Amino acid sequence: MTMNDTFLKACRGEKTDYTPMWLMRQAGRYLPEYQKVRGSVSFLELCKSPELCVEVTLQPIDILGVDAAILFSDILIPMEAMGLPLEFHEGRGPVFPKTVRDRAALDRLIVPDPGETMGFVMETIRLLRKELRVPLIGFAGAPFTCATYLIEGGSSKVFWETKKMMYTAPELFHGLMEKITETTSRYLLAQARAGAQALQLFDSWAGILAPADFAEFALPYAKRIIADLQQTGLPIIYFANNGATLLEYSAASGADVIGLDWRINIGDAIKRVGNRAVQGNIDPFALLLPKEKLKERIKRLLDDAREAKGHIFNLGHGIHQFTPPEQARFAVDTVHELSSR
Ligand code: CP3
């Protein structure tokens, strides 16, 4: 079994034969094959069944021809393990019926042993490594993004409760960030021991913060996790969504690869992140373009990224659930074809 290590080489800034590609949220509802598995179990049951997680992780590898696999799980799994019951409601997304908004709730949170509480994740990783011929990415949410879910009790648009805590009870906010950070470090180290070959931190909500607030309330914690992970020797990817104004800070996180959303030209971003590889950054909706237009856009992006220390082609955020899989496959083939050297 030959191993395709193009993705890992690009993460490390080594020369590759072509630009590797994977898609954020590549396993999911846009695939009929995923919907079939999901038809008989709830999302959380799926996340906790290693055999099914293996199946849906593998689906996009063959269907799309991508150069990396990402563990099928969710960033909120370790938050549930900290002691806060988690639910997923159809059409509304994640819900924490109990929130963390005061000292008593913070004190009740535990820093869980990942093997005891999330053994199903490590089991999924071990099983996947026996099947895969592309590298396996493990992941977690970055502490700020995880904190918003615990404080708000789910997804949010204005983040009133989160910002209220940051500005009126900063010691409480920092206390919560400490516990999430410790949990996340231990969780990602356990993923590495189980066999993950790269680790990505998703900071989906970083972009709601003013740069100075990002530097004070979010970045130090992501940085601490990344420092803890250096001992694994694995490439670390940090993705701050909507983070074009935060790029210098993101680069200061210490990550080997900086994830980019689509709101910035990739060439401009490369100048700002210094000696680091980048991952991104086509608008997920560009997959709806007619093929010729999509191809032109991919060519432009590859050209704009030519000065990168390393480039992993990806979407600027997760693939949308109504994207035709066939268009995603065309994008992967086109990236491979246009970038082959
Ligand atoms: O293929 C992959 O990328 C691996 C699996 C993965 C999922 N979630 C599966 C999932 C990954 C890496 C995530 C990360 C995640 N989860 C993030 C960060 C990335 C991002 O998109 O910004 C966030 C914020 C979450 C929290 C979350 N999980 C939300 C807000 C939702 C509901 C919104 C939505 O897209 O449905 C989920 C549910 C979820 N996570 C689904 C999947 C496949 C859909 C669940 C279903 O089958 O109904």
Image (tube, rainbow, N blue to C red):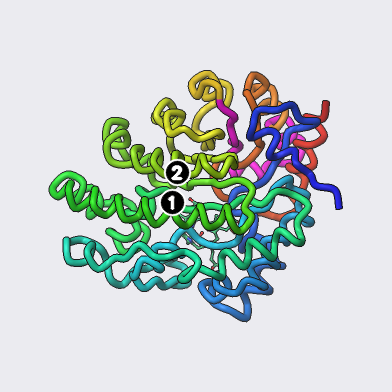
Q: CA distance from mark 1 to mark 2?
A: 7 Å
Q: Are marks 1 and 2 in contact (CB under 8 Å)?
A: yes
Where does the magenta region start and end?
276-297
Counting from the top left corner in percent of width and height, residue 268 is at 53, 21
The C terminus - image quarter: top right
Q: Out of 224 and 204, give the one closest to the viewer.
A: 224
- Is residue 146 found left or right of 268 in the rendered image? left
Q: What amino acid is labelled 2 in the image?
A: Asp
User: Looking at this rendering, what residue extends furthest in the right direction?
Assistant: 1
Residue 210's image quarter? top left
Counting from the top left corner in percent of width and height, residue 146 is at 38, 54
Does residue 27 lie above or below 266 as drawn? below
Within 10 Å of the Cα at label 1, are there few (<14), some (14-19), or many (20+) other Cα atoms? many
Q: What amino acid is labelled 1 in the image?
A: Ser
Does residue 257 lie above or below 124 as drawn? above
Q: Out of 153 and 136, give the one closest to the viewer.
A: 136
Element type where label 1 sits in the image: helix
Counting from the top left corner in percent of width and height, residue 37 is at 66, 74
Q: Earlier in the sequence, mark 1 or mark 2?
A: 1
Disc number at residue 185? 1
Counting from the top left corner in percent of width and height, residue 54 is at 68, 66
Disc number at residue 16? none
Disc number at residue 228? 2
